[in-house]
Amino acid sequence: MLPALEICNASAPESVSNRIFFDDLADKFGLTDAERKELLAGGRQSRFENRVYWALVYLRRAGLVESAGRGMNKIT
């Protein structure tokens, strides 16, 4: 969750799209294309995107990030 919060902080006061989170975090962790595209057991969503979404959910619940529209996040 800390890397996601750092991305929000770096772009403050602007909001950050989910797509930017996916790309920046995948680059930061050095994920390969195969790792980025690995699907969950249900076969609909990538494991990596799912984990990023959950990190954002927990950051919102903690009051550290707020939704700034659909697919947009902003540090509080």
Image (cartoon, rainbow, N blue to C red):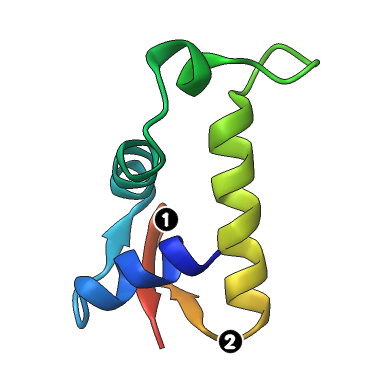
- The residue carrying mark 1 is 70
Image disc number at residue 57:
none
- Answer few, some or many: residues within 10 Å of disc 2's Cα (few below 14, many 20 plus, some between 14 and 19): few
Image disc number at residue 63:
2
Which quarter of the image is occupied by the N terminus?
bottom right
Pick whichever, 67 or 65, lies toward us: 65
Write down the quadrant of residue 60 in the picture: bottom right
Q: Secondary structure at mark 2?
A: loop
Which quarter of the image is occupied by the C terminus?
bottom left
Residue 53 x %, y %: 58, 49
- The mark that comes first in sequence, 2 or 1, is 2
> Residue at 65% of width from left, 53% of height from top?
54
Q: Nearer the viewer, mark 2 or mark 1?
A: 2
> Residue at 63% of width from left, 63% of height from top?
57
> Residue at 56% of width from left, 61% of height from top?
56
- Left or right: where 61 falls relative to 23: right
> Residue at 71% of width from left, 11% of height from top?
43
Image height of 32 relative to 3, above or below: above
Pick whichever, 53 or 68, lies toward us: 53
Residue 35 x %, y %: 51, 19
Q: Amino acid at mark 2?
A: Gly
- Answer few, some or many: residues within 10 Å of disc 1's Cα (few below 14, many 20 plus, some between 14 and 19): few
Write down the quadrant of residue 41 in the picture: top right
In the image as oriented, which residue stretches furthest toward the right? 41
Q: Amino acid at mark 1?
A: Arg
